[in-house]
Image (cartoon, rainbow, N blue to C red):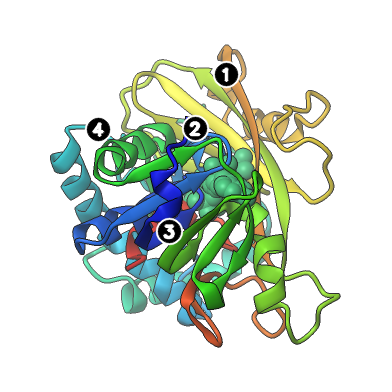
Amino acid sequence: MIHKAHFNKIYDTAIIGGGVLGLWAARHAIKRGESVVLIEKRHIGAGASGGFLGALMPHMPDGWDAKKQFQYGGLSTLSEAIAELQSDTGHDCGYRMCGRIMPLAHEKMLQHMPVRIKGSSEFWADGYEMSLLNTTDFASDWINPDVAKFGIQYDTFSARVNPRAYLSALEAYVRPRCEVLEGLECVGILPKLGQIALLDGEKISAGKIIVANGYEAYPLLQPFMGAMNKDKPIGCGVKGQAVLVEYAHNDDLPIVYHDGSYVVPHANNRVAIGSTSVGEWQDATAFDEDNMGFYERATELVPALKDAPIIDKWASVRPRNTLEGKGTDPYFGAVENYENLVALIGGFKITLGVGHLIK
Ligand SMILES: Cc1cc2nc3c(=O)[nH]c(=O)nc-3n(C[C@H](O)[C@H](O)[C@H](O)COP(=O)(O)OP(=O)(O)OC[C@H]3O[C@@H](n4cnc5c(N)ncnc54)[C@H](O)[C@@H]3O)c2cc1C
């Protein structure tokens, strides 16, 4: 039940979307002492942040650019941000710097290694590194030597987080300190008036409007960000799915990544397997049993998981930015010509690793 008071008030900050980006934006605004309202169409964690994959994988340390530096800044400060969140809330986020292995299936992949190893020492500080290993360096049932024909790329910088536990911690911080309005859909933004229009015809007023509603932000932002070319969409949703399996391990295994499939070991004898690559889809959250190629590839890659029982399945849609001249780079900041309108739309795979950078 929404009380009328919400519609008569002018908040310092209104946030659309209760995923990892909206919740971090709320946490920072609350810490700055602002009055905050968070508007969520479904419930907190209903979007792409509410799954169980949780890979935090750095871009390759070659061809270094601003996007890679931004992601590095996120991943290298995340453990500290999570420690602070955990201490504020008493919630464990399931974060661990677990490292990552990638099989070198082709000779060409092996040829990249010297540049990447050099790049890791140049661009990754704090002793994080990339190296070339033999298949015998890992138990062969955690990586199939037949796939890793040319060795294994290993890095110590990759990490994992339990997305649902992470969101619970953020929610535990945010919910008692601001207005969280669930079940309300934002259908339009009026930045010049400092207002958000809701489906039921009501309006919410705020000094600053932060749009953080994942792939569903594109129609809201199109009038402001797509102004140069109104017919060209500024982004789209890419669907992915994941399964959670039960597999006894000591929680000392690295992530395995190959050919679009992620294998992410989690605490309590859980391993998540997933991929996000379906461009055309009908139902955002329906798990498609006919799209299990990612799982088959993953169990070929990690034979240990072949008989591990599947205990959960999940599907969702992540945003993919396509803004003219910016490619798939993330939008993190004020929208040009609208100082009070901020877009937080992660257009890349590692949103879980950079949410805390939003100020
Ligand atoms: C299968 C899968 C696996 C993934 N694995 C990883 C991974 O391992 N590592 C990683 O870093 N990233 C991963 N991602 C990507 C990552 O999950 C997303 O990029 C990230 O969670 C997006 O967060 P967000 O806060 O922008 O959006 P979301 O988490 O999608 O949150 C948006 C929220 O806005 C709400 N909303 C939508 N429209 C409205 C509206 N009109 N009004 C009000 N509220 C609205 C939604 O209900 C939702 O709760 C994965 C994505 C998928 C689909």
Q: From the viewer's perspective, is residue 261 above or below residue 223?
A: above
The answer to the question of whether label 2 and label 1 lie on touching residues, with beta carbons closer than 8 A, is yes
**Within-10-Å neighbours for mark 1: few <14, some 14–19, many 20+:** few
Q: What amino acid type is highlighted by mark number 2?
A: Phe
User: Which label sits in the foreground, 3 or 2?
Assistant: 3
Q: What amino acid type is highlighted by mark number 1?
A: Asp
Q: Which residue is mark 3?
A: 14
Q: Which residue is found at the position 34% from the left and 26% from the top?
A: 267
How far is disc 2 from disc 1 in space, using C-alphas?
Answer: 9 Å
Q: What amino acid type is highlighted by mark number 4?
A: Asp
Quarter of the image for residue 31 reads: bottom left
Q: Which residue is mark 4?
A: 92
Q: Which residue is mark 2?
A: 52
Q: What amino acid type is highlighted by mark number 3?
A: Ala
Q: From the viewer's perspective, is residue 321 above or below residue 14?
A: below
For the C terminus, give its image quadrant: bottom left
